[in-house]
Amino acid sequence: MSAPAGVGPAVSLRGIRKVFPGHRGAEDTVALEGVDLDIADGEFFSLLGPSGCGKTTLLRIIAGLEFPTSGSVRINGREVGLEPPDRRPVNTVFQAYALFPHMTIADNIAFGLRMKRVPSDEIRRRVTEALELVRLTGREDRMPSQVSGGQQQRVALARALVNRPEVLLLDEPLGALDLKLRQAMQLELKTLQERVGITFILVTHDQEEALAMSDRLGVMDGGELVQVGTPGEVYERPNTRFVANFLGDSNLLTATVVDDGALRLADGSIARATAGRPVGSTVTIALRPEHLDLRHADAPRDAHLDAVHGVVVKAFYMGSAIYYDVVLDGTEGMLIEVRQGNAPGIENYGVGERVRVRWNPHSTTVLAD
Amino acid sequence: MSTSTGLEQDAVRAEARRGLLIGLPAIATLTVLFAIPLIIVVAYSFGTRTRTGRTDFSTLDLSAYQRLADPLVLEIVSRSLGYALLTTVICLIVGYPFAYHLATRTPRVRAVLLVLVMLPFWSNFLVRTYAWRVLLGSDGPLVRLLGALGIDDVVLLFTPFAIVLGLVYGFLPFMVLPLYAAIERIDHTLIEAARDLHASGWGAFRAVTLPLSRSGVIAGSVLVFIPAFGAYVTPELLGGSRTTMLGSYVVRQFLSARDWPFGSALSVAILAVMLLATTAYFRTGGRSL
Amino acid sequence: MSALGAATARLRRPRPPRTLAPTRAVERLLAGNAWLVFAFLYLPIIALVVLSFNDNRLASVWGGASLRWYRELVSDAAVLSALRNSLIVAVASTVVATALGTAAAIALERFRWRGRRTFDGMLFLPVIIPDVTMAVMMLLFFVQVFRFAGNMLGITGAFGLTTIILSHVAFNISFVAIVVRARLAGMDHVLEEAAADLYASPWQSFRHVTLPLIAPGIAGGALLALTLSLDDVVITSFVAGPGSTTLPVYVFSLVRRGVTPLINAVSVLMLAGSMLLVIVSLSLQGRRTGGERRRDGQRSLPSA
Ligand SMILES: Nc1ncnc2c1ncn2[C@@H]1O[C@H](COP(=O)(O)OP(=O)(O)OP(=O)(O)O)[C@@H](O)[C@H]1O
Ligand SMILES: [Mg+2]
């Protein structure tokens, strides 16, 4: 899990563990366990995972708002250890923005610079710049409650960016916005990050957001970082059942290793894939529904593709595509979902029809668990 | 993989130190000016009164507490309980519809009315009680009004009536404010739902409003009962020799009888009743007073 | 939709039902009860004010309006000295209790430390303890302190303004702490974290973020402390010494001897004082919240 070669990592985490002691006899919560992560300078990195998996806790540990039970945190090579948040070259965009309600937008943005005792004419200049950057010029004298949610979000962004932090942390910054605004802000955020060149670490629930915006992303589950990679790597090659199902939909099939390059599926057919496990062991493979297609069971075979047979039990018409549920031979009611593009000339299949489900061997992913 | 660096413990310890440091002045003050005095009172309650009115600690015993069972003391205690309970009930009966009325006004009217309720609450308690002494006195306007109506020789002042009236007057805002807060919080759609399910207006009130304002009823009752039970100024100004309440009786032990052990035992007993009342309050799910 | 159509639609749309408001008859009863309660709350006060202007010594006989009693009052040395004592005690105990109570609220609401729960319980006791019990506690405490100081250190202590102020501090800390704590609990802790994240030291974060946001709570707590201090009779009378009588204690002793128009006048002044205090604080609060909208940023952070 190392950063792309080149410059040293902006953030480097080693063996991060965080335990929240249970109060009055309640059990302790292990919020983070053995997290190792390097994030490169200037990278847009996303942390993705279900609710309660520890994303916010990890972010707070980098910000200094929480201290790890054990492990080390380095920012640009410097161990920050017990440094309080006000000594770290890191700024945060909080989930509900946390704008100071008793200060104007300009005063909110200037806050960090004033605390650092930047000369006042420089403060004025940089606040003006920051307002331009987030397109809020002319609103600087309003109170936070007098601007819209999207504008508040941009104030929070400006308030953090104006300090030119080495790393910017964003905790679900778009979570409170409606879908349309969120999509517009995603684009804006990405463009902004490229412009200012600051390392961004974004926490999100939203897989599409993470896939669309990040250079790399990390998937978390139950306090552990389960996979880190580019969006393409993580989506195309999920390493565990959890990742395969959390990011998009996956069909999981059980198979037995026959020899180095071949697996036997439940109906006896062979899938070409390298498991890297001893012959005879059982593995799970993942197949994306959109990587599968259907043919009549008696259509001629294509030697380049792997295939299993089954019976269509349901067809969902979704406009641009049709989803089929297929029960595979040799399994007891095990369903596989197929997403068949709906172009002119593509055949439709009815319920009860015997079909062959085919895929390119390259799209087979053997999971680690 | 993880090596314990003790970072967290250090941080937690530093925070604990800072918290304690900030709280320390108040802790020290309250320890000296509250906890120690409390201990001293308890110590006195186990002493005995010497003939000269001093307190003898050489024989710590329960004699002061035994005197709590004197018929006279029991009479005063039960009178105080009775007045306090009566006051609480009257405040509830008058205060609930009043709070309900307040809570159903438009926000603007509500704000004005609330200030009008708060204003006497913030005004001097002694003076407000004194006003009743003037009003109820034998040459006061009320007695003269009754006289003009042909009702002669009524004595209002120095009666249980005057005391309970004064207590209700003094503590009614304590009942109204939590009731108002509880009723105002109730989601209107719940009542609509009850009406929609064929409850009558009264039925909806009983099924929704009353149970949901229970916390206000309990908080208000505790807030009225506690000061009413320990009241001193009101019974002193509006009561007579045959309506002595516990507060006055305690004061008498110190200022005239000079029986400090007995006065201390009474104080400890009052404190125990208060603690019981508040514990009961928290047991029934009450939040902070 | 045409303008006419829109208008009729608005007419036809049922007015939102005032569901909490019951039927007309019940509504009238409730309104009647409300009027009676307000009359009950205010009539005694009004009567007192009127009587304080009565030239006649007897409350029952109207001798015409005059300022006679007020004139008598301002030349009454005992009243003036009691008033002076009251103000000294109230201001001193309020200042101390507000500082200590606010600190206690912050320590309890924002930090975790051992003994926190015990302290929380101890802080709660003075609120529920009746005045008489508190009075007994303070009396016996000072008696012991004086005895100890006399025997061990050879210092003679005496009851006076200091003992009164200390006693008022003892019960006021808790009230201030409770009011301020409620305000703190309503203030999102994430704002302080945001300040720290923006390089504010703990002190700067308190100074620029926490303090301005809990200021109304502190003011409310201080007002409560001031009121309670000016209200107190029992505790003060237990720990007062010669010459340190406060106004309520003085009035109380006068009243027990009998009602006089002079007391009416003193009472009206005390009432006016407390009402003035409340009205000033209410209008200050009103300006604070109203100003938020109007201010439009002319105000800026005091530069760090
Ligand atoms: N201060 C705390 N005290 C005790 N437990 C905590 C604390 N903060 C977080 N936790 C627990 O740690 C775990 C991780 O919480 P965290 O807030 O990091 O999750 P998250 O991934 O950000 O979730 P979400 O997506 O819902 O925001 C949860 O089980 C949570 O209950
Ligand atoms: Mg979170």
Image (cartoon, coloured by chain):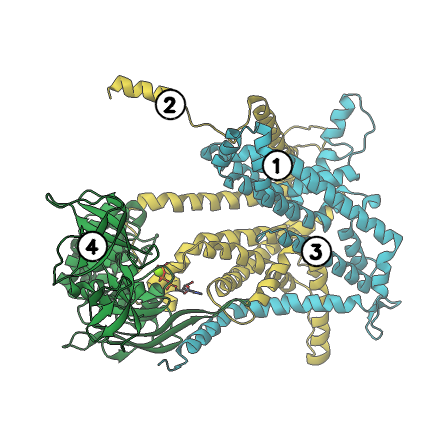
Chain colours: A green, B cyan, C yellow
Q: Amino acid at mark 2?
A: Arg
Chain letter belonging to callout 4: A
Tell me: C127 left or right of C99: right
Q: Are marks 3 and 4 in contact (CB under 8 Å)?
A: no
Q: Amino acid at mark 4?
A: Arg
- The residue pinned by badge 1 equals B96
- The residue pinned by badge 4 equals A356
For the residues tagged 4 and 1, is the chain the same? no
Rendering quarter of residue A204: bottom left
Chain letter belonging to callout 3: B
Q: CA distance from mark 4 to mark 1?
A: 75 Å
Secondary element under disc 1, as helix, strand or loop, is helix
Q: Is mark 1 within 8 Å of ligand 1?
A: no
Q: Earlier in the sequence, mark 3 or mark 1?
A: 1
> Residue at (10%, 43%) from the top-left corner?
A344
* Mark drawn on residue C13: 2
> Residue at (61%, 25%) from the top-left corner?
C29
Secondary element under disc 4, as helix, strand or loop, is strand
Tell me: B125 left or right of B185: right
